[in-house]
Amino acid sequence: MLKSTMADRPLTVRAILEHGARIHPRSEVVTSAGDAVVRRATYAEVAGRAARLANALRRLGIGPGDRVATFAWNNQEHLEAYLAVPSMGAVLHTLNIRLAAEQLAFIAKHAEDRIVIVDASLIPILATFIADVPGIEHVIVVGEGDAAPLGREVLRYEALLAAEEPRFDWPEIDERQAAAMCYTSGTTGDPKGVVYGHRSTWLHSMAVTSGAIFALSERDRVLPVVPMFHANAWGLPYAAWMVGAGLTFPDRFCQAAALAKFVDEARPTVGAAVPTVWNDMLGLAEAPDIGSLRLIVCGGSAVPRSLIDRFHERFGVRIVQAWGMTETSPLGSVALAPIDLSEDESMAYRATQGRPAPGVELRIVDDDGNELPWDGEHTGEIEVRGPWVTASYHTREGEADDGEKFHDGWLRTGDVGAVCDRGYIRISDRAKDVIKSGGEWISSVELENALMAHDGIREAAVIGVPDERWGERPLACVVRADGDAGAAATPEALGAWLAERVAKWQVPERWAFVDAVPRTSVGKFDKKVIRAQHAAGELDVVEVTR
Ligand code: AMP
């Protein structure tokens, strides 16, 4: 074999940090302080503070492989931890601030967190579980705020940084070493830990910035609304830093009105969030000025075509759907339109989950694990593998790996769909959400998309409920829009609307009109809660005969 002559330099977060700091020192990091007030810092300043943080952490005893947790909003300090912790060889563990205390305690213990960096506003939540995690040696508080509820001594972030030098002798790091970890939200069983490597993070960042995905450059300002505890804010902080794009962080001000104001102030060019965030923005009484956005990245759950259309019509802003998982770093696929089609024709492709990103291999398999053809018809479970796709979950000594989630080295995603001959994926459901009615499958995603295209509907989630005759039937849980359009959205009218868009036998008989669809810890519609509400008889269900 002829060996390559190329140097084997490691692909690391340290390399991302140093490149961004040296080549783009004037790029900006903007954080919302609410009410159109913002804080600004340059990359040079942030890098200096990241070095100070690394010095402080080392002084507190943090060394290679040690876990440093964050319990924080999307802001500059969180970015400093993103850069400092992996670059010093330690492991960043982003805790999901919206999980229940019991789950948080489990996760922090399982990850063996030694330090938590907490935003002062989140102290009351940290206080609900910290006593159950004896391994946490230090708490570092960002911002002013009473730490008394924690019942222990804390360290103050700014005081720690002020006492240190803005330089750190970053160590050489093996690119296969852990850089960061994130737990899945665990719909069944305990949450599972995914450990990102330096190499996987570097490669993922390159992919995200590439022309095949979002074409990020220093001309951009990136707005990650997606939390930094949700799959590393979809990898955007590292990707942006790598190319010197500005970063604009909403901090805790993520409600539609506050976010719209922040967009107006910080003028981001690329925004990223789950569909519910953008859907809420459509509901604002006063149309916001979000025209600075050249692109909105939307994913985490299926993006209704109506959302894409409305953003285009109302704001002239392009929504691009992406698919991925915590397990895939998370970029798996992106729905950029084929270039040889008209605007109209390409919409059908933009409303799919898109094509696999370069670097991600994807296949669909039937129940027996046989690979299915990419013809847009054959439907099966989606499996992926690649250098930023996890091949196992984090286990502690004595724990068994969750082998069921893997198949011959491929990750079983639990998503069911078909792929067309051009490589565009159409997900019809999570495997556990598919509705089996009289032996036929009904796609809840298809029903939801069709419902959300109706003027009188603001939100829609469809679940399968037991039915004597058919085994299972769909129940549509919907939030009506205000005004006449909402009032006209009766079960009969909605049934007729659906009958023009899906097979008639798929039209639900059962309807629940609610004030809000429950959401998960990362802002997706929470079908688990809807199912539980239905089982407990808490939903007011209207039944129409067909
Ligand atoms: P999480 O790890 O919390 O990000 O959840 C990953 C799951 O979210 C995937 O397995 C999908 O079920 C779902 N998901 C993510 N993006 C999309 C999308 N664009 N369309 C449909 N489902 C999606």
Image: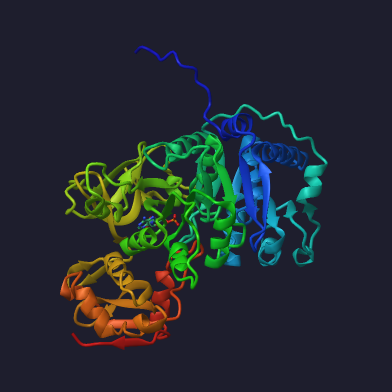
109 with respect to 137 (left or right): left
113 or 440: nearer the viewer: 440
Image: 434 above or below 273: below
Q: How is the image coloured?
A: rainbow
Image: 136 above or below 498: above
Q: Quadrant of the N terminus?
A: top left
Image: 269 above or below 313: above
401 or 327: nearer the viewer: 327
Q: Residue at x 69, y 63 (%)?
A: 121
Image: 366 above or below 199: below
463 with respect to 182 (left or right): left
Work out whether residue 95 can be spotted: no
Work out whether residue 205 can be spotted: yes
Q: Residue at x 63, y 29 (%)?
A: 22
Residue 282: image x %, image y %? 44, 67
Residue 83: image x %, image y %? 62, 40
Q: Residue at x 60, y 45 (%)?
A: 92
Q: Quadrant of residue 48?
A: top right
What is the number of callouts on the image?
A: 0
> Looking at the image, in which quadrant does ligand 1 appear?
bottom left
429 with respect to 515 (left or right): left
Q: Residue at x 18, y 85 (%)?
A: 546
Residue 56: image x %, image y %? 76, 41
Residue 98: image x %, image y %? 57, 64
77 or 429: nearer the viewer: 77
168 with respect to 404 (left or right): right
